[in-house]
Amino acid sequence: MLHAVIMAGGAGTRFWPASRRDVPKQLLALAGQRTMIQATVDRLSGLVDPENILIVTNERLVSSIQEQLPHLPPDSIVGEPCKRDTAPCVGFAAEWVAKNDPDAIMAVMPADHTIGPEDVFRRSLQRAQNVVEEAPERFVTFGIPPTYAASTYGYIERGDSVDGGEMPLFNVSSFREKPDTKTAESFLKQGGFYWNSGIFVWSAQTILNALAEYEPEMRRELTTIAESLGTPQFESTFKDRFAAIRGKSIDYAVMERYPHVTVLEAPFAWDDVGSWRSLSRLHEPDANGNTLIGRHLGIGTEDCIVRTSKDHLVVTLGLKNCIVVHTEDATFVADKNDEEAVRQIVARLDELGWHEFL
């Protein structure tokens, strides 16, 4: 049976001031009327039963996610006691899923991507599920055909063809870290490279076996946690043993070392919505190239991103190539080329002790 694991523990600091510690990116509506996590669950409708959806987040977000997703069983939203990257998150989820369904197939995905059309995405997951059912040793990841030389994504280099058709499947030749612009341009020119979507499908038991082989200490801690599931000792065991795990990404821990990784060429549109500039890809710009969300009056304004509310007017005069974000208690104005520095702002606010803005 197919289970879905949604990783929802990110901080989303690059979306400050809209994204805060208690309301990070995945809890915001950035690409439509629904929040990112609501849209992620929505696109699983009809494919994965609600009781087979597990959301792993951090402790402080559990109640907020429950409020946004009231149709999910409350115990299907689990808060990690501390941040330990994606490998422990995936391993814990696999233990949880396997305990309830030893033959489970897991579809693992982040909570903060935009994907469409939804029916194409669901067919893609079904295709990956079929691959794993026929060959349980296989891991399937989704590769996004690149449309430009992005230096903010990791890449997957495809190898030999495994199966053709509407959604071709290839062996993975290598995983590549986020490249510089020149290297990304060479990937695009050469062909045979995909953006790494961070979406995986595999057997729960197979990923656990792989963690036991490549990260035995991590697997031992996860097994101890799993043995406490359903007992009064679970919360204390989870807190103590999860904190003892050395954090590592699932790519480093398993994917780059496992011999049976395949990549499915994704037929759906995908965006990881990584920063304010990504809104320009998700919303139709006006005649002057401005991406506008909320009430705005622009005079001599070009190539800007403005996000405000329906009730608060933002007026820009002679502004070009800027980001303007208004919230109830903070306003952010930046050159679009300097938006990565928003992380420095968050760090500086923390240093100043202005935690009410975090």
Image: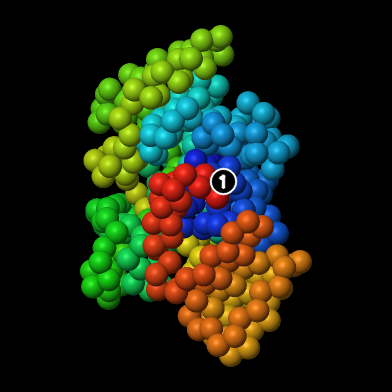
Q: Amino acid at mark 1?
A: Glu
At x 56%, y 34%, the residue is: 60
Horizontal arrangement in the rendering, residue 149 relative to residue 314 (left or right): left
The N terminus lies in quadrant: top right
Instruction: Pinpoint residue 264: horizontal percent, then vertical percent.
Output: 41, 55
Q: Residue furthest front?
A: 352
Instruction: Pinpoint residue 230: horizontal percent, then vertical percent.
Output: 56, 13
Location of residue 63 (image quadrant):
top right
Examine the rendered structure and indicate whether residue 185 appears above or below residue 40. below
Instruction: Pinpoint residue 267: horizontal percent, then vertical percent.
Output: 49, 63
Q: Residue furthest right?
A: 311
- In this view of the protein, can residue 39 be seen by the observer? no
Location of residue 342 (image quadrant):
bottom left
At x 30%, y 52%, the residue is: 171
Q: Secondary structure at mark 1?
A: helix
At x 53%, y 83%, the residue is: 319
Quick one: 240 or 313, which is closer to the camera? Answer: 313
Instruction: Pinpoint residue 54: horizontal percent, then vertical percent.
Output: 57, 34
Quick one: 201 or 250, which is closer to the camera? Answer: 250
Quick one: 176 or 291, which is closer to the camera? Answer: 291
Examine the rendered structure and indicate whether residue 262 appears above or below residue 17. above
Task: Kindly identify which residue carries mark 1.
Answer: 356
What colouring does the structure picture have? Answer: rainbow
At x 63%, y 26%, the residue is: 75
- In this view of the protein, can residue 108 be seen by the observer? yes
